[in-house]
Image (cartoon, rainbow, N blue to C red):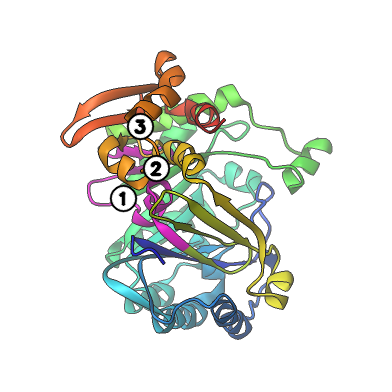
């Protein structure tokens, strides 16, 4: 391990139902086998020879649906993480929750376990949209869950999906205002994405769903940005908005070069080396396959220092405050400022990127209003 900031991601691959748009790694079932799952997580740690008491700065329990484990299952999982890893004094601990699972017993377990942040998959606060998206909760259940989590002193983030067929600007405005009325400090906005092979795709073929329109999605994304920024949240990352002090440290680590260890089916890990090279691995997909070979990797990748530098530009630019060039060049010593300027020249000429003088030197960032082009920018930078 490199000694830089370290994140831990634990993938909980259990859901009560399959959302029609989702292609994440999960299994549907009402009674997740928590004891077996914990044994399998430990087996993965042993098979991969992870150091005992590996120090981590952030912990993120995602899925799937971690709250499907219930209060006692989550207590056992969080206790096992505490026993296996050294959590630094400033650790951020996040757990994903579905609104329908949130009650006082669940929140009590999270607070007692030292969880300081929860992320709720609200997706919408309109009944018709929740039915379309296949969600189990209703708007009132989501509002109560958010209010209860805020009242327990947790830092609360809510996810919204925008641009789904039929969503109008007024509906989005009502969703955003209702979310903010609950006291949440962080909101993540995602355009509905339909991956090949998902149930939504087959529903479209049967005439029971429509595909989202890219132009409508772009409008909804920009409208969401205006609403959230007008309410005092800062658009700090392509998909994320936060009040002061409420940014998601774990997710920022992915974009800013933190090392991370991923445990569980399909979980990814990355180690960054002093010369700039990056090593990654992804676990086997599917609970059964992962359980049979918990230390095996479905995919391994090593990026050369120059390839990692190109990717590092793309990832780093997800943070909309930009890349501080001097600090970034220390991460990638095989390249220099001239290389960066040549690599980004086309996107600067198009108005998608810009250079400016920040408090700590030269900064490269996505130009104001151009964040919708981040994927296009990234494709150019890594080509």
Mark 3 = which residue? 227
State which tag comes first along the sequence, 2 or 1: 2
* Mark 3 / mark 1, whichever is N-terminal: 3
Q: Position of residue 3 (x, y in %)?
A: 34, 65
How far apart marks 2 and 3 lie (CA) works out to: 13 Å
How far apart marks 2 and 1 lie (CA) works out to: 8 Å
Which quarter of the rendering shows the N terminus?
bottom left
Residue 93, image x and y in percent? 36, 66
The magenta segment: 231-260
Q: Can residue 338 be seen in this snapshot? A: yes
Instruction: Check contact, mark 2 vs mark 1: CB within 8 A.
Output: yes
List the single residue furthest toward the front. 334
Mark 2 — residue?
240
Q: Residue at x 17, y 37 (%)?
A: 360
Residue 356, above or below 4 = above
Check disc 1: other Cα within 10 Å, few if <14, some if 14-19, many if 20+.
Answer: many
Crowding at mark 3 (Cα within 10 Å: few <14, some 14-19, many 20+): some
User: Residue at label 1?
Assistant: 247
Q: Foreground residue, 319 or 204?
A: 319
């Amino acid at each position: 391990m490199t000694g830089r900031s370290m994140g831990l991601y634990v993938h909980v691959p259990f859901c009560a139902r399959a959302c029609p748009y989702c292609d994440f790694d999960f299994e549907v079932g009402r009674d997740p086998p928590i004891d077996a799952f914990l044994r399998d997580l430990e087996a993965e740690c042993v098979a991969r020879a992870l150091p005992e008491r590996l120090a981590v700065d952030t912990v993120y329990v995602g899925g799937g649906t971690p709250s499907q484990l219930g209060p006692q299952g989550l207590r056992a999982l969080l206790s096992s993480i505490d026993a296996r890893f050294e959590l630094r004094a400033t650790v951020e601990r996040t757990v994903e929750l579905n609104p329908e699972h949130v009650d006082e017993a669940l929140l009590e377990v999270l607070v007692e376990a030292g969880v300081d942040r929860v992320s709720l998959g609200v997706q919408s606060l309109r009944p018709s949209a929740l039915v379309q998206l296949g969600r189990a909760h209703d708007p009132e259940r989501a509002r109560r869950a958010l209010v209860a989590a805020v009242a327990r002193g947790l830092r609360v983030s809510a996810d919204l999906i925008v641009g789904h067929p039929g969503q109008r600007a007024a509906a989005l405005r009502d969703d955003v205002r209702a979310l903010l009325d609950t006291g949440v400090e962080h909101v993540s906005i995602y355009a509905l994405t339909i991956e090949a092979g998902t149930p939504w795709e087959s529903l479209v073929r049967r005439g029971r769903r429509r595909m989202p329109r890219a132009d409508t999605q772009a409008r909804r994304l920009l409208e969401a940005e205006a609403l959230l920024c007008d309410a005092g949240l800062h658009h700090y990352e392509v998909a994320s908005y936060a009040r002061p002090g409420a940014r998601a440290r774990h997710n920022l680590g992915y974009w800013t070069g933190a090392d991370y260890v991923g445990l569980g089916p399909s979980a990814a890990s990355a180690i960054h080396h002093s010369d700039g090279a990056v090593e990654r691995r992804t676990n086997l997909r599917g609970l059964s396959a992962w359980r049979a070979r918990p230390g095996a990797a479905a995919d391994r990748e090593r990026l050369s220092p120059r390839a990692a530098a190109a990717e590092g530009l793309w990832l780093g630019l997800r943070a909309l405050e930009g890349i501080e060039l001097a600090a970034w060049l220390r991460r990638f010593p095989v390249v220099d400022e001239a290389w960066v300027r040549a690599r980004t020249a086309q996107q600067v000429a198009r108005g998608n990127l810009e250079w400016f003088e920040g408090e700590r030197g030269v900064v490269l960032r996505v130009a104001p209003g151009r964040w919708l082009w981040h994927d296009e920018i990234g494709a150019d930078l890594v080509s």
